[in-house]
Amino acid sequence: MSKRGGRASYARKVKKAVHLLFFRRHYRPGAKGSELKKALGPDYLRVLKVLDQLLRPLDLQVKQVFEGAEPIPVLAVPETPEGSGGESKSPDEATYYVVLRGTFEPTELKYCGWRIDDMAALALSIALILARGGKAPRKDVEEFLSRKLPSWRVKMGLDRFIRMGYLGEDEAGVLYLNWRTMAEVDLRAFLDLLLRYEVAQSG
Amino acid sequence: MDPFSIPVEKLIEVVKALFPLWEMPEDLSLDAEALEAISGVIKAQSEWVKERSTKLYRDPFLIEEKLGQIEAGELAELFLRTWHPIVELEQLTPLSLEMALKYWFELPSKEEAVEEELVEKPGPMPEIGGPEPTFEEIQDALEALWKELRARAKGGSIGYWEFVVADTYSETLERAYLTSFLITYGYASLGFDPFREELVLRPRRRPRRRPKEKTTSVVIPVDYEGWLRHVQEGR
């Protein structure tokens, strides 16, 4: 294939990747590696890397997320050749999302339908669940949130976080961190900021 | 309980020292139970080490203490610095179009609807239209209603129907629905005034949470005829 033909083929694949990643087709957003492979071919990781470069000026980024694991920028994902095997998971099993590369300013929150109180409630729920080793009874989380927010907002807020996929609730009423928190939140950085915040205040 | 506070090695030594003395099967069975319990402690120790070796482990007491001290706005700002939301767009899909088409075909025709109306004679229903209210809009509506209730009750109570009934049936339904939330979450109480012989609403200055308090569910039908009657009585 000529250089121009190859470039045109990549341009087509990048467009297709945009359609698959931006437009929601299932219950969850993003696309599975296996779906991308089927639509874009075995070199889909390279296509995603090209897309990532194109999205950089728009403050967006493509990320790879394995179930229950921290997200990895697609640029940092090695392009393993087909059938190489090994102990690491196949990139086809991961889900790929387009996320905001940077972060929002508090004043920008209202543009995406969040109130500062709701954001605080989400942050508090996530931190509390992390402090309890990844699981916390809903009752405890509600009690903690009720110290700062009206009780109807607490209940409605938690239900909303569950609906959106930030939190999950099992049959015993125990809350845990769900797929959206894993995909969107840099949990390590969040906990570090929280710890450092107090040090800075007391220091 | 800290699993490392249990002296596992000493316990095993004791079990080992006593083992030759046992002859009866009951004694040996008890010995086996003791060993099983010790293995449970070792398992708990293993989980403890595993949890603390993860990258996300931080002192839970420290985190909870900080969460208790930090202001909501400050916590939200900290969180925002680590939040990278997913970009997603919703649109019509072939599946949703198919479902809509199925729904459309299952809808009764206008003639069928008229026939049903003649048989059942239902009261006129409020028109439902416009976009679904957002979470924030519901919250704001609840807060506004609570404020209105406090103002109209003037430190005492107000008749339920006097408060809920509005100019239109749909608005009355909306007010009744939101009022039920105010009662459920303790922002107002619903009682019966024996002198006025009617249901009354008493707003509270602050929401009251009494988990042990015996609660009762009250069903208040808000039908169209009832609404008309209350509107006429009000005039």
Image: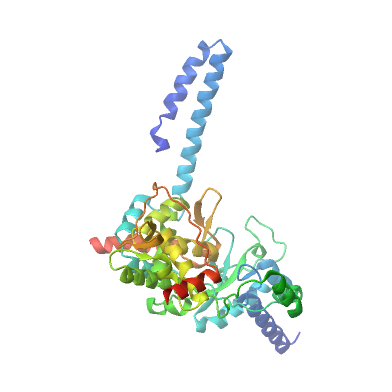
Instruction: Please say which color scheme the image uses.
Output: rainbow
Q: Quadrant of residue A106?
A: bottom left
Number of marks: 0
Question: In the picture shown, does residue A28 fall above or below B212?
Answer: below
Q: Which of B229 and B46 lies nearest the eye of the viewer? A: B229
Q: Quick one: which residue is furthest to the bottom in this view? A: A4
Q: Which of B82 and A84 lies nearest the eye of the viewer? A: B82
Q: Quadrant of residue A151?
A: bottom left
Quadrant containing the N terminus of chain B in the rendered view: top left
The answer to whether residue A92 is left or right of residue B112 is: left
Q: Quadrant of residue B23?
A: top right
Query: Could you say where residue B60 lies in the image, as x and y percent from the top left?
Result: 38, 51
Question: In the picture shown, does residue A20 fall above or below A6?
Answer: above
Query: Could you say where residue A61 lies in the image, as x and y percent from the top left?
Result: 53, 76
Query: Could you say where residue B151 lies in the image, as x and y percent from the top left?
Result: 31, 71
Q: Is residue A131 visible?
A: no
Query: Could you say where residue A137 lies in the image, as x and y percent from the top left?
Result: 46, 50
Quadrant containing the C terminus of chain B in the rendered view: bottom left
Q: Quick one: which residue is furthest to the left in this view? A: A203
Q: Residue at x 68, y 86 (%)?
A: A7
The answer to whether residue A91 is left or right of residue B83 is: right
Question: In the picture shown, does residue A5 fall above or below A87?
Answer: below
The answer to whether residue B7 is left or right of residue A95 is: left
Q: Is residue A85 visible?
A: yes
Q: Which of A3 and B35 lies nearest the eye of the viewer? A: B35
Q: Which of B171 and A31 lies nearest the eye of the viewer? A: B171
Q: Residue at x 52, y 25 (%)?
A: B35
